[in-house]
Amino acid sequence: VTAILERAARPFISAERYGARLEALRRLVHETGGTALLAGPGAELFYLTGYQAMALERLTLLVVPADGEPVLIVPRLERDPAEHSPAGGAGLVAVRTWEETQDPYALVTKALQSSLPNLRSPHTFFIGDRLWAMFVLRIEATFPGSRLALASDVLKGLRLRKDAEEVDLLRAAAHAADRVVTSIVHGRLVGRTERDVAREVVERLIDEGHDGADHGQIVASGPDSASPHHVGADRVIEAGEPLVLDIGGSLGGYASDTTRTVWITGDRGVGPDDEFVTIYDAVRRAYDAAVAAVRPEVACESVDAAARGVIARAGYGAHFVHRTGHGIGLEVHEDPYIVAGNDRPLEPGNAFSIEPGIYLEGRYGVRLEDIVVCTDDGVDVLDEAPRELAVVSG
Ligand code: ZN
Ligand code: ZN
């Protein structure tokens, strides 16, 4: 019953919000002189309509013309889910279906003609960043001489600024991941393979309300923890070594991504050595410095520099081998990237990870990761799993 109540209370994106997104996008396509945005299954389609479409060899395409009504073209057998999607159900998009023997590209032409009586040529289409080449080439052939640009050119600015409902979903996903990482850390670890623990992570994420958790869970023990993207494999976790858990999935379409590093003592109580304590402390202070740097107008690269400076001063600059963070939302990695060279100023609603790390090859590594949101005057840290060094028996 509790689970049912919690699911019922899950935050959701209202039809009104989808309407506002579609209209804001249409205006951007219009202002840039584009003909239409064409997006297939994936984050862009979901962002604009709430429709979680299957990526198939059959064409599914959202057409958002510069003027006129957005049209969602789907294979006949997908009509029901498309019509019952938030935007379909609210009449924000016209759902048009094609039969197995029909040419779906004729529907694309029709969707544009009905809304643009005087089609300008050559056309500029904003094409979904991850639309398959087989569809892109057919669109190009259907509209010869058209100019193709990335959908993110017009969509990025909108998706970068998370609204309150999106932040609620990111927070719900973060809290679920926090509960999972905390329970795994305090469970049995010694003698199990990393892969076995990774499997438990996926199960628990689903139990905690995630819809899916199919991007590889990072379970890295002992020397494996010195590799930032080590995915749980056959190594057996031992006493007297650290464990890096970097876990996540998606809840209501929004991603979680949390990392905690613990030290496992085992029965004999083999505690962390001095250097491990030193690097954990440096990573923790780097995390604090980066979080403290987050506020509107601060450049993304300044947040990276805040974390990097702490680790460099501790003498481990060469061992912090990746950027400090990445944007997060409908995709685990999206704009804004918290990296040197990115001078984009932060804006309220930007959501991203702060995840400094130190990796000593052949020995071990430490990483700490939370998701934060830039607010009107500072930062909102979404994750709340404890951040002090946990020394557990395992
Ligand atoms: Zn992560
Ligand atoms: Zn991350």
Image (cartoon, rainbow, N blue to C red):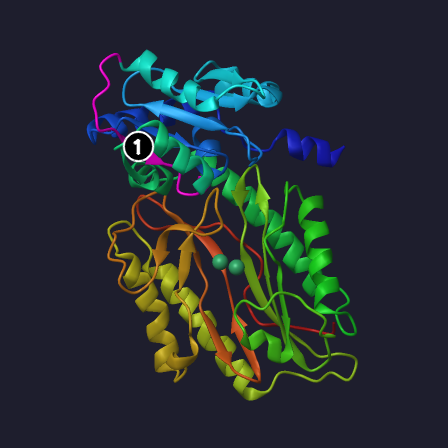
Residue 163, visible in the rendered structure:
no
Q: Quadrant of residue 302?
A: bottom left
- Left or right, 109 with respect to 43, comes to left
User: x, y (%) of residue 293?
Assistant: 32, 60
- Quarter of the picture containing the N terminus is top right
Q: Secondary structure at mark 1?
A: strand
Which residue type carries mark 1? Phe
Q: Quadrant of residue 316?
A: bottom left
User: x, y (%) of residue 201?
Assistant: 69, 56
User: Can you identify the residue that label 1 sits on?
Assistant: 125
The answer to whether residue 126 is magenta is yes
- Quarter of the picture containing the C terminus is bottom right
Q: Which residues are magenta?
A: 117-132
Q: Residue at x 56, y 42 (%)?
A: 172
User: x, y (%) of residue 168?
Assistant: 50, 38
Q: Residue at x 27, y 29 (%)?
A: 29
